[in-house]
Image (spheres, grey):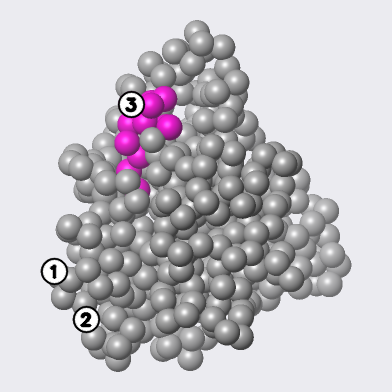
Amino acid sequence: MIEFVARANQFSERTAVVSDGDQYSYRHLLEASSRIARALLDGRTDLDEARIAFLVPPGFTYVALQWGIWRAGGIAVPLCTKHPTPSLRYVIEDTGAERVLFSRGFTDVLSPLQTEGLTTFTPAEKFGVDTPADLPDVAPARRALILYTSGTTGRPKGVVTTHANIRAQITALVDAWRWSASDRILNILPLHHVHGIINVLSCALWSGGCCEFLPRFSEAAVFDRFRSGEINVFMAVPTIYFKLISYYDTLPEDSQRDISAALREFRLMVSGSAALPVSVLERWRGISGHTLLERYGMTEMGMAISNPYAGERRPGHIGQPLDGVRVRLISEAGTQVPANSTESGEIQVRGDNVFREYWGRPEATAATFTDDGWFRTGDIAVLDAGAYRILGRNSVDIIKSGGYKISALEIEEVLRTHPEIRECGVVGLPDEEWGEIIGASLVADPGAVDLDQLTTWLRERLPGYKLPRRYIFQDDLPRNVMGKVTKQELKLAFS
């Protein structure tokens, strides 16, 4: 029996999911996922890791489909609701999905694929059967989920996690962040990504808590739910916090007071999936009374490092390894960075949380692990007084200029403190003399930033070799669906 099912039986009459204004208990979830599993089996005894893709909005149907696929012995392949037809085709073809379950709202984007006869497409709303049938016993070591990376360096790769991997990812967070059945979280994150699936949805349901979905995101709707007093946990990406802050600042003082009073009653607030600007952390702390908990993870491993639930949360730092996760830093020379050193190194991780493989890509899988079994994250960090601090991704955030290795994130953090700069992105640009020079894209009102004055301002805060040599202005930075700046696309804007 899938462990989620065994645990859900303990919370049968508690509310598991709220979506589209309706409340669904754990019993409803168990019954719906059982009907879906039996329909997927259609006389078979086990899906035997057949891939089942699904394209539905976040809500009860999503959860029931995910659980139903797992209970039938299949591998769940959630599709991104914002992807165009070619991107959906790629995932469906790459996984060899035997079926795509979809909500009617996605008929148009899928219709070209249906015309091609790519696979079996089935409406999801009423999918399921009431015919009694035994469900397979699914071992923890079996594959459970395929999530696709953002594909910033080539075609996206399918990250395969097992039921055991998922369990390790969830239990580490449930313990570290002290989840309980009394928790109710508002989930506004995409459900084709580990942040929304594991950190929010799965941790809530593992604990007997409630996961609530909005019909559509708006700052006003989020704050309305906060003011209800029913929500006590919230997780988002930095872009969302920035949007909430901007909206909050437009509200009258009495509304601001009500929101701040409600936020101070929350148990936990978390930020992740992209670097959190210290300026956003401090502004949100002023509004809510909470220091956002920053953590570090990837599609390939869930979460590996987290600031403490109780204890100091240092701005710009991601904290310490979670229980059951081993972390080391490896220098550019290939040696392990000593614990008492300020030298930077690549974060490498071992633990039951780490994924099994890239789907259908044995060479890529082998390349991402060391000979002794450590996962190479590609992220560069330092251990600063007992807490890890990310410098950036080796490929896009570490700029090598004139013999220096420069953190783009550090420069971005300084630029964001300038009163006229709303947002920024820093990249390395090819240069014959220096190897790379620093380029900065600024989001600001037209004419608000004088570049000569900005350079003088920066010289008071950064050494000369860290000053940008090229600037561009943009209305907004290029981002993926999680709100993370896509640095490769940003580099093209300097062409």
Instruction: Give the distance between the C-alpha atoms of the residues marked 1 and 2, in whole angstroms.
Output: 12 Å
Q: Is residue 469 above or below residue 55?
A: below
Q: Depth check: give the residue in front, 276 or 269.
A: 276
Q: Is residue 286 magenta?
A: yes
Q: Which residue is mark 2?
A: 336
Secondary structure under the numbered disc 1 in the rendered image: loop
CA gap, disc 1 and disc 3: 33 Å
* Residue 40 x/y as whole percent: 58, 61
Q: Which residue is mark 1?
A: 340
Categorize mark 3 by other alpha carbons within 10 Å: few (<14), some (14-19), many (20+): some
Q: What amino acid is found at the position of numbered circle 3 in the picture? A: Gly
Q: Which amino acid type is marked by label 1?
A: Asn
Dividing the picture into quadrants, the one containing residue 265 is top left
Does label 1 or label 3 sit earlier along the sequence?
3
Residue 84 vertical placement versus 347 (above, below): above
Mark nearest the camera among 1 and 3 is 1
- Near mark 2 (Cα within 10 A), the count class, few <14, some 14-19 or many ≥20, is some
Residue drawn at x 38%, y 16% is 261
Q: Give the camera-side residue of 459 and 123.
A: 459
Q: Please, what is the three-letter code of the amino acid marked with disc 2?
A: Gln
Question: Residue at horizontal 48%, vertical 86%?
Answer: 364
Residue 165 to residue 316: above or below: below
Identify the image quadrant of the C terminus.
bottom right
- The quadrant of the picture occupied by the N terminus is bottom left
**Mark 1 near mark 3, Cβ–Cβ under 8 Å?**
no
**Numbered circles on residues, count:** 3
